[in-house]
Amino acid sequence: MSPRARRITGVPAGAGPELARAREGAEEPLPDLALHDAYSKAVIQAAERVSPSVVNIEVSNPAAARRRGGRTPGAPRGSGSGFVLTPDGFLLTNSHVVHGASLIEVTLGDGGRYGAEPVGDDPATDLAVIRIEAPGLTPAPLGDSRSIRVGQLVVAIGNPFGFQTTVTAGVVSALGRSLRSMTGRLIDDVIQTDAALNPGNSGGPLVNSRGEVIGVNTAIIVPAQGICFAIAVDTAKFVAAQLIQSGRVRRSYVGVAAMNVPLGRRTIRFHRLTQAAGIRIASVEPRTPAERAGLRAGDIVIAFAGSPLSDIDALHRLLTEDRVGAPTPITVLRGVEKIDLTITPAEAPTD
């Protein structure tokens, strides 16, 4: 007899046929077995729904060879994951998977292999869109970031170390995390999960129990176990739409190099500030919005567009596409003075 089940042996007089059958040796499953079956069913259904949309991506990157000083013959190859966005061949993956690649090859779940063309790349959010010409593509259904809850079941699908369509399961460990991108900007609203991710999972989908994509797997903390991250699907939707439309995500910039600095108590009291830190300008790039606005090295920026600023990340969040060409108030501390200026951010140059 299974140790996870109990046999019913005593049947009172006048009992119905159900208990009579139990006397013959029927086993009654314990409630935790039923829960285990439901869990397995949820993972299986989610994986079966999304797996046809998951692809393996292999790239050749000559830039990496040049960084190695040409010691390795040929262009190093890398791999990652992605998934189908649209039936006409647009695929979503991570920027760090395809950035700078000279050759991109995509393998579908049915084994079909296709060359891919880059459509757009946004290192600031570590997302990229590529495109293939292939028939019968199945787009992955997209979910909603607002519906995600800590503790809910999630399934990650990808190609770790080249093992295609590998499925791992876990839960949402935390919401609202931030990750530093390759450009130095913070990626906000990142999902933390304990669903196991490995090199090669990057760019694959993180899905809920209904098989809807709620995140794009992007990073792990190497020394840790069970601390993995995915970019929320609402961020992915916005960025993918921009990349498909124009090949890039438009953002504004002002043209300064700066650092976070604490403000003295006397300064805070004298100017009646609401924050304990500001952004000290280390240098102003020539022919930029900052130079035209009259900003100087040594100025401490304390407000932009009417919002108090205490760190560079807060400024980055405000430098959106809507600010391009829009005169915007900026407040700085210069010596003991508080000075109000007007700056007109320009479109950030692409790399």
Image: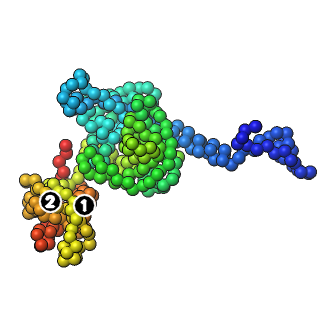
Q: Is residue 225 left or right of residue 313?
A: right
Quadrant where the N terminus sits is top right
Residue in the image at 17% along x and 57% along y? 258
Residue lying furthest top? 73
Amino acid type of the residue tagged 1 in the rendering = Asp
Q: Position of residue 42 (x, y in %)?
A: 57, 44
Q: Callout 2 environment at 10 Å: few (<14), some (14 to 19), or many (20+)?
A: many
Checking the image for residue 311, the label placed there is 1
Rendered image quadrant of residue 277: bottom left
Please, is residue 68 above or below residue 245 in the view?
above
Whether residue 324 is visible here, answered yes or no, is: no
Between residue 310 and residue 59, name the one nearer to us.
Answer: 310
Q: Callout 1 environment at 10 Å: few (<14), some (14 to 19), or many (20+)?
A: some
Residue in the image at 80% along x and 40% along y? 26
Whether residue 179 is visible here, answered yes or no, is: yes
Q: Secondary structure at mark 1?
A: loop
- As measured in the structure, the alpha-carbon distance from the residue carrying label 1 to the one carrying label 2 is 12 Å
Residue in the image at 9% along x and 58% along y? 291
Q: Is residue 208 left or right of residue 289?
A: right
Q: Secondary structure at mark 2?
A: strand
Rendered image quadrant of residue 37: top right
Pointer 2 residue: 281
Q: Position of residue 120 (x, y in %)?
A: 27, 41
Please, is residue 144 above or below residue 307 in the view?
above
Residue in the image at 26% along x and 45% along y? 182
Amino acid type of the residue tagged 2 in the rendering = Ile
Between residue 16 and residue 187, name the one nearer to us.
Answer: 187
Residue lying furthest right? 13
